[in-house]
Image: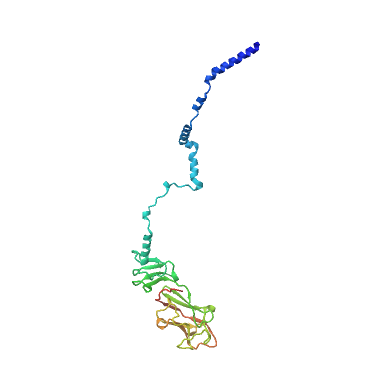
Amino acid sequence: MDKLKKAIESIGRDIGTLQANQGGALQTSKAYELFPTYATLQAQMTTNIKEKHVDLGLDALIDTKLQNGGDPFVTQSKLPTIDTSQLASKNDLEELKRSVGSGSGGSSNELKGQGFPYALDADIGTTYIDTTAKNGAFKWIKKRAGVGRDNWVILAGDTGKVRARNINSALGASYMEFRRINSTVEINFGGLSWGWFGIRRRNSPGYVPQGSDRERNVVILNVQGIPVGFRPLGSKIGMITNDKGQRLGTWYLGGPGDGNQFCLQFDDPVPTDRDIGDIRFSSVVYVTEDPWPETL
């Protein structure tokens, strides 16, 4: 019994000690006071972000986002400012185009355009560049007032080699070829072996006699057969030979007063039993005042 009594007394003392110390424990009401409210927590987080964004690494994060994989975003404040009041309007450009096209574009003495300048009413002495070099012509000069093709002279142009069409009496692959450089025209012949030119035997198919001497004269290009752009100021004549240089007769280029034609005039009657296949020509070079050819 004594032991039981002592145990009960010991338990009583422990309970008393606990009761005595209860006043120092954290009470529920006090715990709620210590826990921050939502508004307090939000304000504290905002303050921390404003004051500690570098420590938190927010600047680096924003820079990485703005780099956009090597293609940085441009903010409106960094966009360049353009003064559009200084730009030419559509009407300004059209007026400039009309000014240049009419030849009234100020003090410039050289115009540029596409195609022949015949429609331009420029001052005398004005030069013109065709940026397309139509048919080989690219520079002109104005020689008379007004518009029209007779008022412009070619300064620089080259048609290249131009084969005559529908030549008569020619043997095999024989050809007649024009070339105009500026105002000078040259005619060349060839097509057969070693550059020879030939004609068919008289009275054979394709042979065309010339009316003034049907036995000796043969038509190569008929009346008006010399193409416009290559016609001479007047008629021309020269010599034809065989390959050894022995005279066969003459060539004849008719000018405007004689039909713009080309004929061969042999000293002897053209054979009826054989072709002539080794004809050589003296130089056929002359000046023309024709406008530049529209077609080649």
Q: Residue at x 38, y 59 (%)?
A: 90
Q: Find residue 193 and report its horizontal and vertical position in percent.
A: 54, 79
Name above or below for residue 103 compared with residue 225: above
Q: Residue at x 52, y 25 (%)?
A: 28
Name above or below for residue 9 compared with residue 253: above
Q: Residue at x 48, y 43 (%)?
A: 63
Q: How many marks?
A: 0
Q: Find residue 128 and report its horizontal and vertical position in percent.
A: 39, 68
Decide which of 132, 240 is in the foreground and name it.
Answer: 132
Q: Is residue 58 left or right of residue 142?
A: right
Q: Find residue 195 and report its horizontal and vertical position in percent.
A: 52, 78
For this orientation, the residue located farthest to the top is 2
Q: How is the image coloured?
A: rainbow
Residue 243 in sight in this render: no
Task: Please state, as top left, top right, bottom left or bottom right, where the N terminus lies in the image.
Answer: top right
Q: Find residue 5 and report its horizontal and vertical position in percent.
A: 63, 12
Q: Residue at x 39, y 66 (%)?
A: 112
Quadrant of the rendered structure where residue 86 is?
bottom left
